[in-house]
Amino acid sequence: MHSWSTVTVGVADLAEAEALWCDTFGMSAVADREAGDATLATLWQLPASAIGRQRLLTTPGQTTGRLHLVEFLDPDPPVREGANTF
C-alpha cells in the first residue's frame, strides 16, 4: 500500500484554508511558522518576501498524509478563478 507523506499547497488566506481543512476534514495544526521562509523561497525561486505564514496540518493519529499550507503575501489570481464546479 502506498501513501503520501506531505503535500504543500500555496494559499492566499491561511486562516481560510486552515478552517476548511480543520473544520471540514478534521485535520489539526501540528506546526506553524509566522514569518517568511527564505529557504522555501529559494527552493521555489521566489523572492524571500513572497512567503508569509505557514501551517502543517495532519489527521490526528496518522503518521502520513500531512498538508503543508503556505500563505503567499501577494498571490497571483487563482488558476480556476471564476470556473464552474462539476
Image (cartoon, helix red, strand yellow):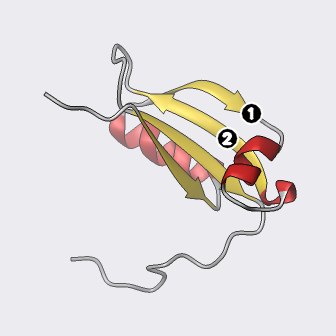
Q: Is residue 85 left or right of residue 10?
A: left
Q: Quadrant of the N terminus?
A: top left
Secondary element at tag 1:
strand
Is residue 14 among what the camera can see?
yes
Residue flagged by tag 1: what amino acid is it? Arg
Residue at (49%, 78%) from the top-left corner?
79
Q: Are marks 2 and 1 in contact (CB under 8 Å)?
A: yes
Report which residue position mark 1 lands on. Answer: 33
Residue picked out by circle 2: 54
Query: SS class of the residue under badge 2?
Result: strand
Please tell me how crowded label 2 is: few (under 14), some (14-19), or many (20+) other residues with Cα within 10 Å: many
Q: Position of residue 56 (x, y in %)?
A: 56, 32
Q: Give the numbered dot on residue 3.
A: none
85 w.r.t. 68: above or below: below
Residue type highlighted by circle 2: Gln
Q: Earlier in the sequence, mark 2 or mark 1?
A: 1
Give the residue displayed 32% in from the left and 35% down from the top.
4
Q: Is residue 12 above or below residue 86?
A: above
- Return the x and y of residue 74 as percentages of the image width and height: 77, 68
Residue found farthest to the top: 61
Residue 37 visible, this angle: no
Give the image location of residue 11, x and y in percent.
Answer: 59, 58
